[in-house]
Image (tube, rainbow, N blue to C red):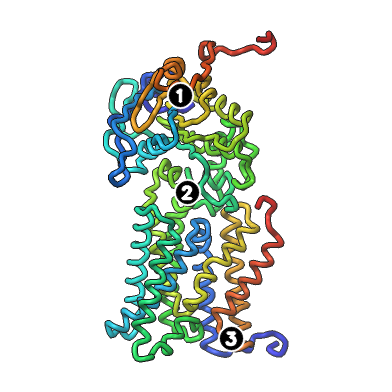
Amino acid sequence: MAYPNGCEKQGNEFCGLCCTKVEHFGVKFGSKEILHDVNLHIHCGELTAVIGPNGAGKSTLLKAILGELKHSGNLNYLDAADQNTGVPVIGYVPQHLDFDLSSPLSVMDLFAAGNSRLPAFAAHSRSLRQKAMESLARVQAEHLHDQRLGNLSGGELQRVLLALALTPIPDLLLLDEPVSGVDQPGMELFYEMVSDLRRRYDLSIILVSHDLPLMARFADRIVYLDQTVKSSGTPAQVFNDPYVTGVFGRIAVPALPKGQIIDLKDGV
Amino acid sequence: MQNWLPFEWTQYHFMLNALLAVLLVTPLFAILGTMVVNNKMAFFSDAIGHSALTGIAIGVLLGMGDPLLAMLAFSIILAIGISNVKARGRSSPDTIIGVFSSTAVALGIVILSREGGFAKYSNYLIGDLLSISVSQIMILTAVLLLVLLFWSIFFNQLLLVSVNSSLARSRGVNVRVVEIAFSIIVALVVTVSIQWVGILIINSLLVLPAAAARNIAVNMRQYHLITLLIAVISGLSGLICSYYWGTASGATIVLCASVLFILSLFGKTKSI
């Protein structure tokens, strides 16, 4: 099984010691400051949810981490031995596909474009097919391999994109409102899947989301962002922060300790 | 055999040259067209085609016998310009391209129509496939090879950019470089072929085969094969029809492609 670089060196499945450091990030569009002095430490095996009002710069932060937007400050990836391994391998699941869904693009084509040297219009090699099927199996989407992207439901599409983002297993996984436009059961299924994959592959995850109750359930840490980090900590800490409750009101945080499984047969 | 098959046209040298040119130009346009349509660049390639007028005008002002080099230089500068403004600006790409394109057309017409001499450039408007020479066919061959090389190296990156630029970035694609390189290739191909296809219809040849194939294809491989097939079939049938009807070959080819596009609507995949 493949693990993020640092964890593999440690020989420990769930080391939790690798750390992605976002240090003093700032982004400007012209003279307008979108983000300033954002500091985040993301440990592997942790799901960090970034929440905040519209226009707070949440997506901008992800684009800056990706290197798509110019920013000030540093992005450092430290492995378990605290050695700087430089730029992390990043997986990214976009908010919504900003492209024409009538494009004749199959799921396998997308994997070919992202993982193969052979052009996607050529026949796909056996090794690519195998790799893609393994990746799709992680998100229970093997059966979708020959579908056109445009034929998939919102939830299916996001699972396929998640599978692509996990090939190869990244040091840092970025999810930008991955389930906008997906129905409630699809949303929960997706987050359960992400949560489970995080444990299995010891992933560091930054997730931008509007679904606060779901984040209270699934996230290990919450960061409240509005141009800079206004509040951060466990869901209980952030959702009880007077600053945050002042904006969002009260969010119920599940009282159960994280990871505990509710057995429905016993009744609640 | 000649009595019942339409092969009379093969006796003429110019028709054979035109046939070669069609067999080079249509695949060239088909291949580029797939990603022009996917990247919603139809308006961009149209602007590049129209800007050829300014290129010709610059060539004439510089006293060049064949304005091709001036046209190439101008269209590539324009392609880079549009690409840069698009990347930086917040306004709609359509507006930016519209501004560039109409300025280029107007400037070209103003310069070329001095002393009422525009008529001798009207060939560029409708194209003249039948006057293509062997050396010009060689140039087209070289361009086709260049595009094939570009396609085999950059296609995956181009495809990822067309899906989502942040996604492409996360797979290590330098989005700006790929976008500019593709713009330059489109500008190069459009400009080199404009004399034979014609400013007014060149964009249809680029867009129609791919647009038709999108109605039928379910993956990239089919998309490419069907686009190529539609382009070559309309190229050959258009050329032969134009001979018998005595019509402009470029426009006749485009009409054939339009017919195939309409047919493709009947085979449309259910998803759309």
User: Secondary structure beneath disc 3?
Assistant: loop
In the rendered structure, are the residues bearing label 1 and label 2 in contact, judged by CB atoms less than 8 Å apart?
Answer: no
Which mark is on residue B247? 3
| Residue at x 49%, y 61% (from the top left corner) | B36
As drawn, is A14 to the left or to the right of B67?
A: right
Q: Position of residue A54 (x, y in %)?
A: 44, 35
Q: Chain of mark 1?
A: A
- The alpha-carbon separation of the residues under discs 2 and 3 comes to 41 Å
Q: Residue A147 is drawn in which quadrant? A: top right
Is residue B83 or residue A209 the one in the foreground? A209
Both marks 3 and 1 on one chain: no
Which mark is on residue A47? 1
Q: Residues within 10 Å of mark 2 (few under 14, many from 20)?
A: many
- The alpha-carbon separation of the residues under discs 3 and 1 comes to 67 Å
- The alpha-carbon separation of the residues under discs 1 and 2 comes to 27 Å
Q: Position of residue A209 (x, y in %)?
A: 49, 31
Q: Residue A51 is drawn in which quadrant? A: top left
Amino acid found under the numbered disc labelled 3: Thr
| Residue at x 44%, y 50% (from the top left corner) | B157
Which mark is on residue B160? 2
